[in-house]
Amino acid sequence: MMVTILPPADAVRFLRWGATGDILRVREAVPGRASQIRGWSNCAVLSAFLLGRSSWVWTPHGLYRQLLREKSTRREDVQQLLTDQFTKIVGYHSSNALSVSADQLSLPLRELLIIIGRNLLETMMTPSLLEVCYTAILEADRYPDATRAYVQHGPNPAIAALINILERAKVTKEIDLEDCEGGARQFLAMLHGNVHLEAILQLRDIPTLSEIDSRTRMAVTAFLDGVALVKAKRSTSRAAVARH
């Protein structure tokens, strides 16, 4: 017996094929009441034996009808399966990446952005998340709820956390930024840039921790220098208006 575990993208392709018919969820009963008395004759017998069922069916459809008669059997919706899986995987990684201690929240904005940015970028490059992101893009038209689940539990919490950090920095006068949401989205875009897309499409190797740290520091510097530049321009503009 061989058990194969498929990565998310391959699993979705398999599920798309399976969705042309019916997908049933059944509870295995191993060793159950299965018997090899009929030998290894066909796929229906092998599947029944694997599930621990005592079966005399000869065809897959016969096994399907037998399983359907069981009270615990239920039909599965592919989109709901993907939505639940995306929610579980993305939610787990997202919560870990965005967990910041009280001591870290009290750090200067530059240091805090480096920490949160490094965590986010490292999480984005997790192979399982890259697979999920690729699948969410590939299947957006066919399974929109699954794609929305990816966005809801991935990018959206990251943006919300960054908005909160920038608003706190705005209150403490560390930055002069009118649109904190726009700033959060811009910083996140600067952080992953093309490197995330290239990793999803397997056009490059996943960055090392050293490369992730270097990229994060560059993004933080560029972002904060941009905010400072905007502040300087506003001050110059106000001074010019005052002179007139």
Image (cartoon, rainbow, N blue to C red):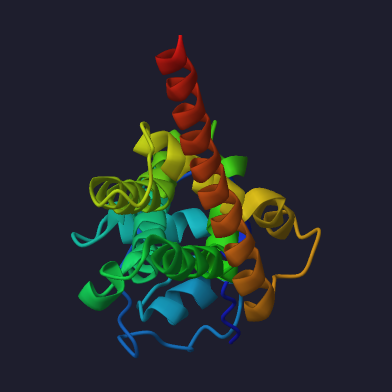
Quarter holding residue 94: bottom left
Residue 159, percent across and down?
Answer: 38, 47
Q: Nearer the viewer, residue 157 or 85?
A: 157
In the displayed image of the protein, which residue is found farthest to the right? 203
Residue occupying the point 44% across, 74% down = 48
On the rendered structure, is 232 left or right of 87? right
On the rendered structure, is 61 left or right of 217? left
In the displayed image of the protein, which residue is found farthest to the front? 243
In the displayed image of the protein, which residue is found farthest to the left? 71
Residue 117 visible in the current orientation: yes
Q: Nearer the viewer, residue 169 or 118?
A: 169
Residue 73, percent across and down?
Answer: 27, 59
Residue 99, percent across and down?
Answer: 30, 70
Residue occupying the point 81% across, 58% down = 203
Q: Is residue 46 above or below residue 233?
A: below
Residue 14 visible in the current orientation: no
Residue occupying the point 42% across, 65% down = 116
Q: Nearer the viewer, residue 177 or 31?
A: 177
> How many numbered marks are there?
0
Q: Is residue 191 above or below residue 114?
A: above
* Quadrant where the image shows the N terminus: bottom right
Residue occupying the point 34% across, 62% down = 88
Residue 136, percent across and down?
Answer: 53, 46
Q: Is residue 233 above or below residue 193?
A: above
On the rendered structure, is 6 left or right of 241? right
